[in-house]
Amino acid sequence: MCNYDGPVDVFEASAAQRSLKLTDPIMQGDDVKRLQVALIKQGFDLGPAGADGFLGKATDDAVRSVQQQKGLTVDGVAGSNTLKALGL
C-alpha cells in the first residue's frame, strides 16, 4: 500500500471541477493529485509514483474500483458522483 504524508490543505477545490479520466496526453494537475490523495487514503495503491498529479493507468484502475465498490457507473471518469463518493 502506498502512503501519502504530504499536506492536503494546499489542494483547494476549484469552483469549476473537470471530469478526470485517462487520456492521451495524460491529464495532470492539482485536481488529479487531490483525487490520488483521496484514493490512497481509501487504501488504493497507485504504485511507486503515488500522488504525482499525473492520471495514469494505476489511477484509472483505482477510480474504476471505487466506482464498482460504490455502485456507480464503472467508466473510469472521476466526475461529480465519483468525487463525492471519495469525499471530494
Image (spheres, grey):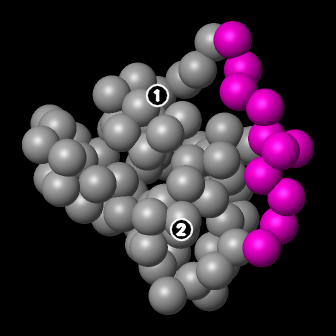
Q: Nearer the viewer, residue 25 or 86?
A: 86
- Residue 10 visible in the displayed image: yes
Q: Quadrant of the C terminus?
A: top right
The secondary structure type at the circle numbered 1 is loop
Query: What amino acid is found at the position of numbered circle 2 in the picture?
Result: Ile
Q: Secondary structure at mark 2?
A: helix
Labels 2, 1: front one: 2
Residue interval drawn in magenta: 5-15
Confirm or deny contact between disc 2 and disc 1 (CB under 8 A).
no
User: In which quarter of the view is residue 62 placed?
Assistant: bottom left
Of pointers 2 and 1, the one earlier in the residue sequence: 1
Residue 3 picture quarter = bottom right
Mark 2 vs mark 1, CA separation in Å: 19 Å
Q: Residue at x 48, y 60 (%)?
A: 39
Which residue is at a point 67% across and 65% down the rendered structure image? 51
The amino acid type, in three-letter code, at marker 1 is: Ser
Residue plotted at (29% across, 46% down): 76
Is residue 20 visible in the rendered image? The answer is: no
* Residue pictured at 65% horizontal, 47% vertical: 34
Question: In the image, residue 53 lies at what x, y percent?
Answer: 69, 55
Q: Is the residue marked by circle 2 packed among few (<14), some (14-19), or many (20+) residues within 10 Å?
A: many
Q: Position of residue 49 (x, y in %)?
A: 65, 78
Query: Is residue 38 shown left or right of residue 84?
Result: right
Position of 68 relative to 80 (above/below): below
Q: Does residue 69 appear to the left or right of 41 in the view shown?
A: left
In the rendered image, which residue does mark 2 sit on?
40
Mark 1 burial class by Cα count in 10 Å: few <14, some 14-19, many 20+: some
Check disc 1 and report the residue beneath it: 19
Q: Quick check: 80 left or right of 29?
A: left
